Amino acid sequence: MKTLARMAVTLYDLGSASGLKKLDEYLLTRSYITGYQASKDDLTVYAALSKVPSAEYVNVCRWYKHIDALLRISGVSGEGSVVTVKSSLVAEAVATPPPADSKAAAADDDDDDVDLFGEETEEEKKAAEERAAALKASGKKKESGKSSVLMDIKPWDDETDMKKLEEAVRGVQMEGLLWGASKLVPVGYGIKKLQIMLTIVDDLVSVDSLIEEQLTVEPINEYVQSCDIVAFNKI
C-alpha cells in the first residue's frame, strides 16, 4: 500500500480571489489538504474560509462540501499540523478563540456563590448524577467507529464510459455511507480507473460487503471490472 509523504504547506490570504485560486490549483489533484484522510490540516483551512467558496473554484467547493459533511456526521480527528495559513485577518480568525459568553460567565460565578458552606441537597445530588450520566453517554456517542476509505474502481476496458461508471457507483446509497471526492487516474493503454474517497460508519457498513454485494453485481458490473481498497483509516 502506497503512503503519501507529508510536507509543510503554506497558504496565503484565503479571503482573496488570488488566495482561493491558489488553493483551487492545489486541490486539483488532492482529496484532502494533506494525506489520504481528513485531518486537523483540513480543519485549519476550513476555519480560515469565512464563507462557502464561490462555485468558480470547483476543487475548493468540492473539498469544502466534503469536509462540511464530515463535520456534520462524524467529526475529524486525523493528525495534521503541517499547514500554515498566513494573513493578518485569516490568522486572527483561526487563532483567536471566540469571546466568552458574559452571561454564561456570570451564571458560572453565581453557581460558585450558591450555598458554598451549606450541605448538598438531594436535588443537587440528583442534578449532578444526571449531568455525569449525560456526559458519559455523550462520550460513548463520540466513540462510535467511523473510517475513511480510498478505493480504486477499475473499468473493463478503454471503451467504458467512466462518467456513467461514477454515476452508478455514487448511486449506491445506504445508511452510514458517504461518498467523497474522486478523480480519474491513468492505468495504461488508454484505460483510466476511478479513485474515490468514502466515509463509513463501521457498525453499519462493511467495505467488503459493499464491494461484493453492491459494486460488482448487476447492473453496476456492466461498467465495473474490480474494486481495490488503497487506504483504510479510522477516524
Image (spheres, rainbow, N blue to C red):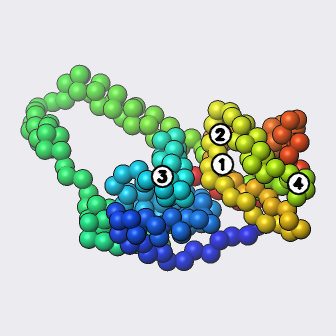
Give the Cα separation between the discs numbered 1 and 4: 26 Å
Report which residue position mark 3 lands on. Answer: 55
Amino acid beneath label 4: Glu
Q: At 77% from the left edge and 44% from the top edge, which residue is drawn?
A: 164
User: Of residues 66 and 222, which is closer to you in this image?
Assistant: 222
| Extreme residue toward the top, this view | 123
Sooner in the amino-acid sequence: mark 4 or mark 2: 4
Report which residue position mark 2 lands on. Answer: 177
User: Of residues 93 and 187, which is closer to you in this image?
Assistant: 187
Q: Which mark is residue 159?
A: 4
The residue tagged with tag 1: helix, strand or loop? Answer: strand
Sooner in the amino-acid sequence: mark 2 or mark 1: 2
Q: Which mark is residue 21?
A: none
Q: Is residue 17 visible?
A: yes
Amino acid beneath label 1: Leu
User: Of residues 194 and 17, which is closer to you in this image?
Assistant: 17
Report which residue position mark 1 lands on. Answer: 198
